[in-house]
Structures are given as structure tokens and as C-alpha cells.
Amino acid sequence: MAGQLVYLDNASTSWPKAPSVGAAMLEAINAPAGNPGRGQHQASKHAGEATQRLRDRIARMVNAPSGDRICLSSGSTASLNMALFGLLWYHPKPDGERPVVVTSVLEHNAVRRPLKLLKREKVCDVVEIGCSAEGFIDAEEVIEAATDPRCVAVVTNMCSNVIGTIQPTGAIGRGLRERAPHVLFIADAAQSLGALPVDVEAMCIDVLGFSGHKSMLGPVGTGGMYVSERGYTSNGVPGEGGPIRATVLGGTGGMLIGSLEEFNPPAMPGVFEVGTSNVVGRAGLLAALEDEDVPAQEVSLAHERRLVGMFIDRFWGDARVRILGPRGVDRRHGVVSFTVRDFTANEVAAYLDSEWDIAVRAGLHCAPDAHRAMGTLEQGAVRVSPGPFSTDGEMGRLIGAVEKLLG
């Protein structure tokens, strides 16, 4: 049933992007190619000003005290790796014991794999918190585990990329600050920023890793991290400023004396940003965030939840279809994952693609422990994630396609 593509894979990367993204990136390519912080000429200064405007815009989104607390990167994976390795490789071992990191079974490989490596190399121990049958972690269980004197960090996602469940981030952060104030709270906002309200101050978040190409509707290869003063405060000594330290060293630009330093100059945010930056991608992300034709965040969330609800209402209770997570959409962002009896997830996705021109994501979604917890590790699941520009008709087409598959 060939036709126009129905794109329902926005949790992987959004499409279409914000209307102004393409033009902004084209302009950045065609304009004089300034490298921010690497020259005194106008092109470099212009790129630097645009970069700072992007930092300030993101800082306002997350209620950070300053744009200088926002470090830009290629996305949430790079940011979370920087945070975890920057904290753990250099962290002092109290009384010769390894530090502990508390996490959950719902984490993406951007968190899971660094922690697996750090554990294998005997850098730290890892405590993994389970989840409920609906796909929620318990804030009290996380906080209790973090009261271990050896615990140095808690890292959890704000939304499960597999199930779509919204986790109790604020309750965890506030509980940690009260009962385990020595612990840094690292939050994975890859699926959250741009989709849900995020307030790093109210939620007591020390590090927030985020992607620019999902709900923020920017280009791929963009994102960054917020780092609190608890996570990094420069003491003026290059190479120090912890507890999170730079893990990538190299050119940081700046004045002549900056290049003489043996380590990255310690000031935020440049201490975590090394090498030539993605000026073109940043131009696209800034355009996406300033685009007045993009629906407001709360409008997009309500729209996407309504579309997800259409699918859930149609197949909830059908013994041939299993929907992961809760029935109510108020505890989800715009994601629903499901399985179909007698079919693997890949078979369902291939059918939707070849017969109906519907794009969804099948498999383990880079979060195998979440699937293990849900009992879908062997067959995987089909993830449907509409975006702000998805329509009722497109969701209706998906529903009709699944009905046809069921026979």
C-alpha cells in the first residue's frame, strides 16, 4: 500500500524538523565559516555570539542560573559519557573502597555501557534498581540505595525511551539533596528536554544530558549537558575543578596564553568543549528553539499523548497485542511500545514499512535491560512515537495496518 511516508519514529530522531532549521544550517554553511573562540575576525565573533545565544536559550529552558553552565556536545550520549567518566576515573577511593553508582534497569546504553566498563575495570561498583510491571522506578528505593557512604552518583533517565514512562526525577533529586547530599544526581533527558518541563534547580539535578535532535526538533549531532556548581566549580587550576573533570583534552581556543596551558583552561563551559565545534548544527538547533511556527511544548505534549491514546484505546485488552506501560497517557510522554502475538517486533516493523509506508522503531532500542524487565528481550517491541506534526489520519493508518495484520 504505497503512499506518503507516515513517520512515527520521533523518539529516535524527530521529523520533520522545525521549519526554520534547514535554512539556518544552509546559511551557516554559505556564510563565512567562523570558528567560535578561534579568531579575532568578525566571522569567528559572529559564530561565538550565536553559540552563546544557544547556551542562554537552553539555560532558560532548564532554569539554569547561567548559559555558562551549558556545555554543548554531539548529544546526550557524549554528554553522559563525559559526566560518568569525568566523575569516576578521577574520583578518590574512600578508605580504599570503590565508589558506588546507583542506576536503574531502564537506562539507555549511553549510561549502561559506560557503567559496565567502569565496573569491569574495578573503578566503581554499580547498584541497579528494578522497575514496576508498568515501567516505573521507585524514588524511595533509589534514595535509600544512595545513602550508602560510598555512593558518589545516581544516574537515571527522566523518561524511558522504551516504555515512555515518566520517572520521578524531582522526587529523586530532592530526596538525594536531603538525605544523601554528598551524591551527585545525573539525569538523562534525551527523551525529555523539549517534551516535558525540566527545572534543574527545583529537581536538584547536578548534570543533565540532552539531545537536540529529538523533541527539540533540531538537527542530528547536537545536544549538550548542564553541569551544576556541585558538579564542577573551577578553582582556577587547569586540569582541576572536580568532582567532574574533563575527559577530552585539546584545543580550546581563547587568547594566546590559553594555548600555553598543559590542560584545558578550567573555566566553564569551555573546559568540556574541545576541538572544532559543530557550528552548522548549532545554528540549526538555535533556529529550532527560536522558531515561532513550532507548537508550544505543552501543546505538543497534549497532542502526542492524544495520538498515543488512540492506539492504546484501540488495542488495550486485545489478547493478541501487548502494550507496554500504563494505560493512562498522563504518565507517559509521546511513546507507546507494543508486541503482537506470533510475530517478532522486526517482522511487524518490516510489514508496516513495506506494506503501509509507516516508519516505527523495532528491536531493543539500545536499552536491553528495560526489555529484560518487561519480558520482551527475545522478541523485542515495536515503538511508536508521533511528533508535534503527526496527524490523526496517520495514527489511524497505523491502527488500520495493525488490525489488518491481526486478520
Image (cartoon, grey):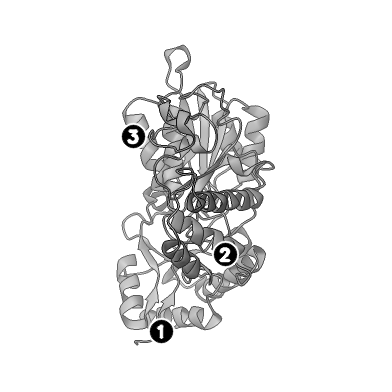
In this rendered view, identify the residue nearer to me: 133 or 371.
Answer: 371
Mark 1 or mark 2, which is nearer to you? 1
Residue 68 x %, y %? 59, 40
Are the residues flagged by discs 2 and 3 in contact, CB closer than 8 Å? no
Q: Around disc 2, counting alpha carbons within 10 Å, would you say few (fewer than 14), some (14 to 19), or many (20 or more)?
A: some
Cα separation between marks 1 and 2: 30 Å
Picture disc at residue 4: 1
Residue drawn at point x = 57 percent, y = 50 percent:
49
Residue matched to label 3: 117
Side (left or right) of 47 relative to 5? right
Residue 229 x %, y %? 61, 32
Secondary structure type for disc 1: loop
Cα separation between marks 2 and 3: 36 Å
Q: Is residue 257 above or below residue 25?
A: above
Q: Please state which amino acid type lies under the numbered disc 1.
A: Gln
Q: Visible in this render: residue 238?
A: yes
In this rendered view, identify the residue nearer to me: 371 or 358.
Answer: 358
Q: How many marks?
A: 3
Mark 3 or mark 1, which is nearer to you? 1
Side (left or right) of 377 relative to 10? left
